[in-house]
Image (tube, grey):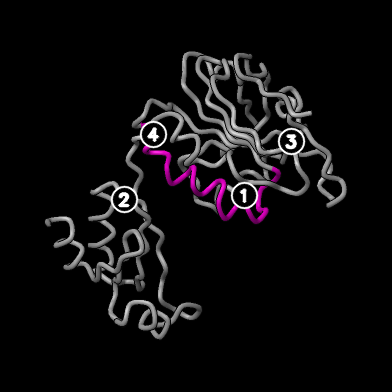
Amino acid sequence: MLKNQEGNQVPSLSIPVMTNDGWSKIETDQLFKNRTVVVFSLPGAFTPTCSASHLPRYNELAPVFKQNGVDEIVCVSVNDTFVMNAWAKDQRSNNVTLLPDGNGSFTEAMGMLVDKSAIGFGKRSWRYSMLVKNGVVEKMFIEADVAGDPFEVSDADTLLDFINPNAKKPEFVTLFSKSGCPHCARAKKLLREKGYAYEEVEIGHEVTSKTLQAVANRTSTPQIFIGGKHIGGADDLEKYFAG
C-alpha cells in the first residue's frame, strides 16, 4: 500500500554522489531546510516515459516554478550516481537536481519502494511528486496503485497548477537551424533574452532541408515555431515579439 506522506518530514539521509571534484554527499536535511522544494520520483533513468515526458517537462517549467516560490526541483530515482549523471547530461536537465537513490534508502523511507523484478528492474520507486516546505511534505501526487507504469498526476503541470493555477506557462518553441548560420544565432539570442526555452533541430544528415520544407514550406534557416504556430525566420521572430 502506497502511503501519502502529507504532513510528515522527508527522510533525513546522506546521499553519496559523484561530482567533477570526486565523491561528495547530499545531505537531505540541508537540501530541504528553510526551503521550498519540488520533488518528483520515477522508476528509472533512460526509460521511455521518464526521458520523454517526466523529467523534460519539469526542466522546461523550472523557471515558472521558481517564479512561484520554489527554490529547487529534485528528481529521485533508484539509480546510481554515474547513471544519473549520464542521464542529466543526455537530457540537458540543468534546471533539475538529480538525486541518485542507488540504495533505495530515500524511496523506502518515503514508503514508495516497489518490486519491479518482473521486468528486470528489481526494487524501484513508484511515480509520485510532492511539494516540500522546510522539510515537511505539504502536498503529494501519487500515481494510482495499478498494474503497469501509470503517469497521470505526478507530472510537472499538475504540481504547478496546485502551487498557482494561474501561473503563466511558456509556449513550446522549436527552432530549425543550420551550423554556422548567423541568423540562427540571432534568433536563439532573442529567444533567450525573452526567456523562452527552445528545442533546436539542426538540419543535417538525419533531418534534411526536405524535412524542413515539408514542415515549414521553406528551406532557409532558422525556422521557428511557437506553440505549434509557424513564426518564420529571425526577422519574423523580431516582428512577432515587437507586435
Residue 241 position (above or below residue 209): above
From the image, tell me which residue sits under label 3: 102
Q: Earlier in the sequence, mark 2 or mark 3?
A: 3
Left or right: where 166 falls relative to 96: left
Q: Quadrant of residue 82?
A: top right
What residue is drawn where x is 36% and y is 44%?
169
The region drawn magenta spans: 43-66
What residue is drawn where x is 76% and y is 39%?
124
Callout 1: SS: helix
Callout 4: SS: loop
Q: For the residue marked with disc 1, what is the amino acid? A: Cys
* One can see residue 3 in this view: yes
Q: CA distance from mark 2 to mark 3?
A: 34 Å
Q: CA distance from mark 2 to mark 1?
A: 23 Å
* One can see residue 22 in this view: no
Asked if marks 2 and 3 touch (Cβ < 8 Å), the reply is: no
Q: Earlier in the sequence, mark 4 or mark 2?
A: 4
Q: Earlier in the sequence, mark 3 or mark 1?
A: 1
Q: For the residue marked with disc 2, what is the amino acid? A: Tyr
Nearer the camera: disc 3 or disc 1: 1
From the image, tell me which residue sits under label 1: 50
Q: For the residue marked with disc 3, what is the amino acid? A: Gly
Q: CA distance from mark 4 to mark 2?
A: 20 Å
From the image, tell me which residue sits under label 4: 165
Q: CA distance from mark 3 to mark 1?
A: 17 Å
Give the image location of residue 43, x and y in percent: 70, 43
In the rendered structure, find residue 196 and report the number of the disc placed on it. Answer: 2
Q: CA distance from mark 4 to mark 1?
A: 24 Å
Q: Nearer the viewer, residue 230 or 183?
A: 230
Q: Earlier in the sequence, mark 3 or mark 4?
A: 3
